[in-house]
Image (tube, rainbow, N blue to C red):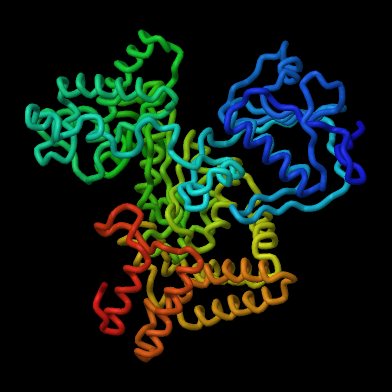
Amino acid sequence: MKNVVLIDGGRTSFGLIYPKECGEKTAYAIELLKKCFYECCGVELEEIQEDSTGNFISVGETEKLAALLKDKTREKKRDAFNIDVRTGAVYLYGDDEDGTVNATVEFLEKFLGVRFLAPDETFCPRTDRLELPLGFYRNVPDFETRMLGYFGTMNDKSFAYCKRVLHDHGNWGLWAHTHFLILPPEKYAEEHPDWYSADKTQLCLTNDEMLKQFVDNLWQIICDKPAAEYFMLGQEDDDTFCDCQRCRASHQKYGGRSGTMMVFVNKVAEEIEKKIAASEFPEREILLVTFAYCKTEEPPAEYDVDTDSFRLRDEKVKARHNVGVMFAPIFTCFTHDIMNKTCNLKVRNNLLGWSATSDKLLVWCYSSNYAGYLVPLNNYNTVVSTYETFKKYGVVYIFNQGIFNSPDTFHYLKIYLHSALMWNVKADVSALKNEFFEHYYKVAAPYMMAYYERIKDNYNTKDTPEHPFHAYCPWNTGAKAFTREIFGEEFLDKCENDLNEALRSVLTCDSDDLTEKLRLRVLRESLFVHYMRLELYHDRYTPKELSKMISEFECLARITGVTRFKTGGGVKVGGPEMKVKIAEWKKKYLGEANE
């Protein structure tokens, strides 16, 4: 079978066609293709008309594509893409518009070797000849919907497109803790105090009068947001629940507070489905989602030791077809597999129980240490197995929350690996890691790789059968890793040597601009070592030395764009600014008052 020669001697006979009217994402895919094609091949793709008789690359829902597929039944899988290479024609299209972007990204990566590493770093290898094998290539993601709650993807929509993840919660009509958004206490509590728990922190989910108003208000929100696909019916962000006499009886009958919640959500979902059927858009599909979180973390299911499985306490708690459950395993030990029956037994059982409760499981998972953003979370050995487990138990949606308002240590490497695994849990992580270091850190790659592996190996040596090391992400338990035993001075010295070698290597670059870019990348990763010295070993330095160290840290954080330190502990979501931590050090070590 002959290949299709797309580029030969720096020339191409192929033109570019695309729909006359297309959406924002298809338009982006077209511009991305043209830009990367030129960067790789030195050729500008000429835009040609649909009725052209020459060779062409078709992007999106063109008339050419419609003619090609007119007698075929098309699948409709969220985000799935298709690449069809024929003699004289290349078709890039998706099952939806996101799929068209994904087809374009895949074409660039698979055939041109393009790598999207960070918003400011796209690797485009040069070539003057490009041959494509004839054939049809289709790919469906392992998880229908994928979002990385990371600074790099949430602050750069184009980069998120290239990593095939969402950049915001735009497809949600309601997100996170929404009960009081739907039924605001300031509007209803005075006249209807029994609609709320005694402490007024949650709704009373067994109150039928409240349910009717809840449905009416929710329906208005749904109508006001016609493009939204998901609506979260999430309890408030407190570890509380209504335990009035009626609710206690419901808990007893349906398997705990989560059982009461599921019965409530199913009733709401049934009423909303009726309203949709009677509306002018009866074909509209939405998913009502509820939280497995805090008081509802445990599923309304019983464990069967003999079968190592769960059965529902009552059929009424089984999620309806238009109901999903978002599981948030925030108390996972990340050193060990999420299915580990020792340290992760509760998380494991909750996952199994909820997968038996709902056919549509959503996961809000985590990949950073919220006690200190600069300290890498020890999930090096469990990232792959965690995603494999989520796929095994039917997860359809993943929101991976990292650090969304400031880059943390090895931030863009994490995006590179996690986005790939969210698409394909069998992705070759070792190969991905190697190519990231090679193309992102360039001449400094060997030293930055050594630094990365040193952190990983340091964690591994601390985890033994006799003395297991558990790593957690919440602000209170995550801080338990910040000890001299975990981060010894000898370890920090070796890390600093790796970083110094990396900094020396960038001085060999051909241009000042590249030297500065790589220098800043190395310095950003060095903040972890500087932080550990100040936090753990400040007693080894004189006030003068500490003053200099704090000033250097402050300068490095500023020039590398690291503005946040931690979250939790009563501070607002997103955590205090880095300057708060610096002021804390100055007061504690130097006796200077907080500003």
Q: Look at the image and tell me in which quarter the N terminus lies.
A: top right
Percent across and percent down for residue 551 are 41, 79
Residue 320 seen in the figure: yes
The vertical placement of 552 against 18, above or below, is below
Q: Residue at x 47, y 61 (%)?
A: 408
The part of the image, by quadrant, that contains residue 368 is bottom left
- Please name whichever residue, 473 or 258, is drawn nearer the observer in this view of the structure: 473
- Please name whichever residue, 303 or 43, is drawn nearer the observer in this view of the structure: 43
Q: Count the numbered circles shown.
A: 0
- 45 horizontally vs 184: left or right: right
Percent across and percent down for residue 464 are 47, 68
The vertical placement of 306 against 358, above or below, is below
- 144 horizontally vs 130: left or right: left
- Please name whichever residue, 353 or 422, is drawn nearer the observer in this view of the structure: 422
- 589 horizontally vs 196: left or right: right
Q: Look at the image and tell me in which quarter the C terminus lies.
A: bottom left
- 332 horizontally vs 41: left or right: left
Percent across and percent down for residue 422 are 55, 43
Residue 339 seen in the figure: no
The vertical placement of 562 against 418, above or below, is below
Q: Residue at x 86, y 37 (%)?
A: 6
Percent across and percent down for residue 78 are 56, 28
Q: Residue at x 32, y 33 (%)?
A: 301
Q: Residue at x 25, y 74 (%)?
A: 594
